[in-house]
């Protein structure tokens, strides 16, 4: 890939901030035009998302508030993959903790993507389940929201109203809906 026309060269990275959730680095880069400088790169932890779709063609989501963007909206369930953890297992665990619904069966890996590849590494893995069992109330008190089965027929409307929060939710739902048409 490094031999592709227009590729950038990297000569190392120096971390300037580092914690469990975010790392910021200065990467010594050379652009295709030959210019060289330190480029800021933000590294976020891997995220695993559970898309649970029932036989009424509804997806399990949380209606919640996100303070950073000052928005209310729907999100799919999921969270950060801890070192040594399995991404699909994280998605299933987070779904149960955030919603009280435990995915049933083996997941289908739907898609993986990087939402902001120009300056951020933020890998996202999405897994699909077609069944879930209600096991109780949500146990993750930090991820408080209203748990809802949302009709997939509303996805375009919700996207238009900017009520699908984050690329993880938007990409997952649009990918799933588009893959059903193939």
Image (cartoon, rainbow, N blue to C red):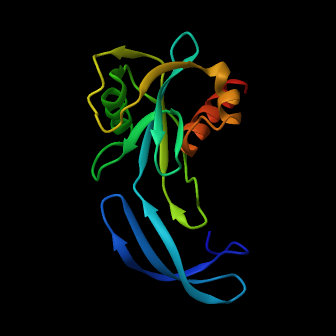
The residue at the point 29 percent across, 53 percent down is 83
Task: Decide: is 9 above or below 67.
Answer: below
Task: Decide: is 50 above or below 118.
Answer: above
- The spot of residue 24 in percent (x, y) is 42, 71
Quadrant (top left, top right, bottom left, bottom right) of the C terminus: top right
- The spot of residue 98 in percent (x, y) is 35, 30
- The spot of residue 131 in percent (x, y) is 44, 16
Task: Decide: is 113 above or below 140.
Answer: below
- Residue 21: quarter of image: bottom left
Horizontal side, residue 55 vs residue 86: left or right: right
The residue at the point 62 percent across, 68 percent down is 1
Camera-nearest residue between 130 and 45: 45
Residue pushed farthest top? 56
- Residue 134: quarter of image: top left
Camera-nearest residue between 165 and 106: 165
Horizontal side, residue 126 vs residue 117: left or right: left
- Residue 7: quarter of image: bottom right
Task: Decide: is 67 above or below 51.
Answer: below
Camera-nearest residue between 166 and 64: 64
- The spot of residue 55 in percent (x, y) is 53, 10
Q: How many marks?
A: 0
């Amino acid at each position: 890939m490094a031999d592709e026309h227009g590729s950038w060269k990297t000569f190392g990275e120096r971390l300037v901030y580092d914690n469990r959730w975010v790392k910021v680095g200065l990467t010594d880069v050379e652009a295709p035009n030959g210019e060289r400088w330190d480029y800021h790169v933000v590294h976020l932890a891997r995220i695993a998302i559970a898309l649970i779709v029932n036989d009424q063609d509804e997806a399990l989501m949380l209606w919640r508030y996100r303070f950073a963007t000052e928005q209310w909206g729907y999100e799919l369930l999921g969270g950060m993959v801890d070192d040594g953890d399995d991404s699909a297992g994280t998605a299933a665990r987070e779904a149960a903790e955030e919603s009280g619904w435990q995915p049933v069966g083996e997941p289908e890996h739907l898609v993986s993507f990087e939402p902001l590849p120009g300056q951020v590494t933020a890998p996202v893995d999405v897994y699909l389940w077609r069944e879930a069992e209600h096991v109780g109330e949500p146990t993750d008190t930090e991820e408080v929201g209203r748990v809802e089965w949302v009709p997939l027929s509303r996805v375009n409307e919700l996207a238009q109203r900017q009520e699908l929060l984050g690329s993880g939710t938007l990409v997952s739902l649009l990918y799933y809906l588009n893959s059903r048409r193939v």
